[in-house]
Amino acid sequence: MVVALGGNALLHRGERPDAAVQQANVDGVATALAAPAHDHELVITHGNGPQIGLLAGESATDPALSAPYPLHLLGAQTQGMIGSLLARTLHDALPGHRIAALVTHTLVHTLVHTLVHTLVRVDDPAFEHPTKFVGQASGEDDARALARHRDRDRDRDRPMARDGKGRRRVVPSPVPERVVETDTIHELLGAGVLVICAGGGGVPVTTDRDTGALTGVEAVVDKDLTAALLAEHLRADFLLILTDVPCVYEGYGSPDQRPLLGTTPAQLRRGGFPDGSMRPKAEAAARFVERTGGLAAIGALDAAYEIVHGRSGTLVRPDLTVG
């Protein structure tokens, strides 16, 4: 089972991003995942939106730096920090389990066009239309000030988008192609290790066709899409996407809002969910179910055990065709 933890599961909306706050939230994560971990082989992935936004803001205003740290290095930092919190807490909650937190890299689309015997890439539209939320929500006045703030090494504004009642910074979120360390994760699972990996969608990288060298990319990969891809390549049976709502809602926030408890990929894609919120979770669940024939579910972290046993959340099952 691949479990995708939302960034807000580690730092709730409106909370101060203090280390003690995140440790307390991770204690709740360990409690929620302890029971499923006794019954299933788990791979745990996690978001990093609030954390990477915090580090990016600190880096952009640090007078000791001649230029801010790039997003791919900040993503690696969040993998280490959150991975350590999860590994230590799960170690205490699951005596006898072997647990490893692994910094992983995710290949993404950037520049590709085709020449004779050479594969180069076209620009992923994600770089022209950033949608991935990072950092915490700001009020309108703070958001306008942040949008006017320019990176010292880039002469462009930081785009902002509405998230709930506030606005947050958005960054490019290219399509993941493959987690570089998939074979290593598979070997660790075979050795009975609970693996924490692909944090923040993995460190986004491109690879040189001739040398295989990896280069970091200024982006944040969506962790749900990476989790679905990883689950597919690991041949997982179940993809569990945990967030801060009990299930997927059709017409969310409208007078006609209603819970969607059982659905198929086709039905899920018709939901019209917003970018940067439920849409990537819905798309990740749909892709995994379509490509593998397995099951996916979306629901609240504290109901993880009930979701796995079909008593909570939104279950996504394969489309049934009548012959």
Image: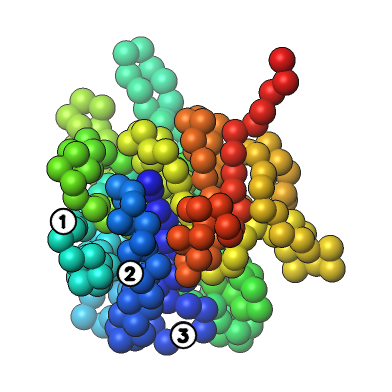
Quarter of the image that includes the C terminus: top right
Between the C-alphas of marks 2 and 3, the distance is 19 Å
Q: Residues within 10 Å of mark 3 (few under 14, many from 20)?
A: few
Q: Mark 2 or 3 closer to N-term?
A: 3
Query: In front: mark 3 or mark 1?
Result: 1
Disc on res. 30: 2
Give the Cα separation between the discs numbered 1 and 2. Answer: 14 Å
Is residue 21 visible to us here?
Answer: yes
Q: Which residue is mark 1?
A: 98
Q: Which comes sooner in the sequence, label 1 or label 2?
A: 2
Which numbered circle lies on residue 48? none
**What is the secondary structure assignment of the residue under circle 1?**
strand
Is 219 located above or below residue 178 in the figure?
Answer: below
- What residue sits right under mark 3 in the picture? 15
Question: With 118 as the anchor, is 155 left or right in this view?
Answer: right
161 left or right of 193? right
Three-letter code for the amino acid on which mark 1 is drawn: Arg
User: Is the C-beta separation of discs 3 and 1 under 8 Å?
Assistant: no
Residue that appears at 62% across and 60% down: 247
Q: Amino acid at mark 2?
A: Ala
